[in-house]
């Protein structure tokens, strides 16, 4: 019983300590998960072929020349190539190219975040998928043919802005 009272006393003390911390410190320390310090972003302010500073990017080496705004996977050599939603070996997306990358050169890909491409024509709110008809392309139409791989990679924010989050989840269609 004595040990139980001690635990309760510690819990109450910690609760009072949290309440006593000023709200500005409390919010920043206990609630905020934003690393950039910016809790709000309007993606419609993005210019063509651009991403937010809060996005996660990485430098990679291209196996062949790659265009901007294309989805890539990592090969067994550690280099990247376009994904192919009709091939279960190459449909595992790693990121989205944010620039053209010459073959065997280094370049940047987006791992997650907002990206704008004026050439897209999405319906806002639709999920984004690997395009089963064009390697590396993004579509807001879910693949449905036999042999296609359903790989959801994000959501359309507007006709030309997508929010991307790449992971290893995909489903084959029989």
Image (spheres, grey):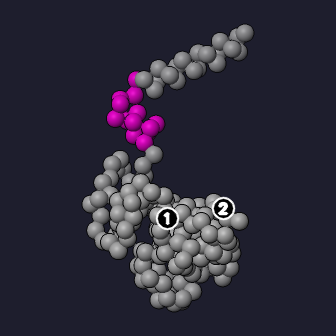
Nearer-the-camera pick, 97 or 21: 97
Q: What residue does disc 2 label?
A: 171
- For the residues bearing labels 2 and 1, Cβ distance under 8 angstroms: no
Decide if residue 91 is in sight here: no
Position of residue 43 relative to residue 104, above or below, is: above
Q: x, y (%) of residue 64?
A: 54, 88
Q: x, y (%) of residue 60?
A: 53, 78
Position of residue 87 relative to residue 116, above or below, is: below
Mark on residue 118?
A: none
Mark 2 to mark 1: distance in Å?
15 Å
Position of residue 27 relative to residue 78, above or below, is: above
Q: Is residue 172 left or right of residue 11?
A: right
**Quadrant occupied by the N terminus:** top right
Taking the spot 38% from the left edge, 57% from the top edge, the residue there is 124
Nearer-the-camera pick, 124 or 66: 124
Taking the spot 64% from the left edge, 62% from the top edge, the residue there is 170
* CA neighbours of label 2 inside 10 A, class few (<14), some (14 to 19), many (20+): few
Secondary structure under the numbered disc 1 in the rendered image: loop
- Kindly indicate the quadrant of the structure image that contains residue 115: bottom left
Q: What residue does disc 1 label?
A: 141
- Kindly indicate the quadrant of the structure image that contains residue 26: top left
* CA neighbours of label 1 inside 10 A, class few (<14), some (14 to 19), many (20+): some
Q: Is residue 25 magenta?
A: yes
Q: Which residues are magenta?
A: 20-32
Q: Which label lies toward us, 2 or 1? A: 1
Q: x, y (%) of residue 82?
A: 55, 79
Secondary structure under the numbered disc 2 in the rendered image: strand
């Amino acid at each position: 019983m004595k040990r139980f009272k001690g635990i309760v006393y510690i819990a109450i003390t910690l609760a009072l300590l949290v309440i006593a911390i000023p709200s500005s410190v409390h919010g920043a320390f206990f609630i905020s998960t934003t690393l950039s310090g910016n809790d709000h972003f309007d993606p419609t302010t993005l210019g063509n072929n651009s991403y937010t500073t809060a996005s996660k990017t990485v430098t990679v080496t291209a196996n062949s020349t790659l265009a901007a705004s294309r989805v890539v996977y990592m090969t067994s050599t550690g280099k990247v190539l376009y994904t192919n939603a009709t091939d279960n070996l190459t449909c595992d997306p790693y990121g989205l190219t944010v620039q053209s990358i010459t073959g065997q050169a280094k370049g940047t890909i987006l791992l997650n975040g907002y990206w704008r491409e004026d050439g897209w024509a999405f319906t806002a709110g639709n999920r984004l998928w690997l395009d089963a008809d064009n390697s590396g392309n993004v579509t807001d139409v879910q693949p449905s043919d036999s042999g296609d791989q359903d790989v959801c990679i994000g959501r359309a924010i507007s006709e030309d802005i997508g929010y991307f989050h790449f992971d290893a989840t995909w489903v084959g269609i029989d």
